[in-house]
Image: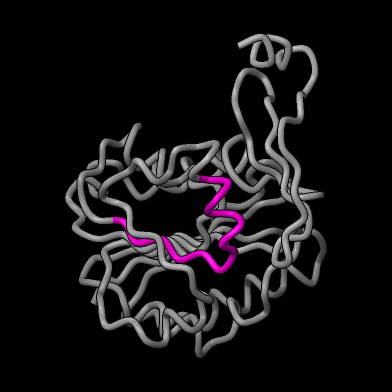
Amino acid sequence: MIQKIFSYLIPIKIFKKKSARSKMIEVTWTNGELVLDSENTNYSYGSLQRILRYGLRNIGYKAILNMDHILLLGVAGGSVVKTLVDEIEYKGKITGVEIDSDMIQIANEYFNLNQIKQLEIIIDDAFEFVLKTKNQYNLIIIDIFEDTKMPNFLFERFFSERVCSLLKDQGFVLFNTMILDEAHNLRNRKYIAEINPEQFSSKMLPRIEDHNELIIIEKVA
């Protein structure tokens, strides 16, 4: 409790670990809340939770409450899961795919992710999982970073078309991206341009928390 109080004055680091997948992972008390960070960016809670909350609000909490199954590609500390369960009061199934088992251990220990009964965690590569899953989903949240970098496969047409093929009717993709330079800007616009407009509507929510841009895709046909 003392650490939480003092964190309003200065951040207080309580855990640090080197991970093979995510380099350095840190858990810190900041402004009265626990956050999960990599070496150079926020991974869960803090600004990331605000970013994804904004995207979910744009989709609509009422629409989310009527969904049966949500897929999360990239779990980290699970802040978006907490938003879904605690704030929106979503009751359906959540499947979380995370490649870094160290991350899930930390999420369970510090953020009690293992206490969320409707959440199934699968330790797997998101690309591999998307290729082999036979399920369909109402909402697919893509939030995959390696520190400040995003894997190239996320922006490849093959992957985006496969992700969109997993959507149920009136389903959504919520894709969190990072814009650090003009090349990233062009990458996102190319990604949007390749979405089939006869089956999907798409939009961008730019410059959230300075460097993040959300892409929302909705299956309309």
Q: Is residue 129 left or right of residue 181?
A: left
How many numbered discs? Answer: 0
State the image quarter where residue 204 is shown: bottom right
Q: Is residue 156 left or right of residue 11?
A: left
Q: Is residue 22 left or right of residue 218?
A: right
Q: Which residues are magenta?
A: 94-107
Residue 216 visible in this rendered orientation of the protein: no
Query: Residue 124: image x %, image y %?
Result: 49, 74
Q: Please report the residue visible at 56 percent of the width from the left and 69 percent of the height from the top.
A: 99
Quarter of the figure with the N terminus: top right
Viewer-nearest residue: 177 or 151: 151
| Residue 167, placed above or below residue 179 | below
Viewer-nearest residue: 185 or 171: 171
Residue situated furthest bottom in the rendering = 158
Q: Please report the residue visible at 57 percent of the width from the left and 38 percent of the height from the top.
A: 45
Quarter of the figure with the C terminus: bottom left
Viewer-nearest residue: 107 or 10: 107
Query: Residue 24: image x %, image y %?
Result: 78, 53
| Residue 153, placed above or below residue 147 | below
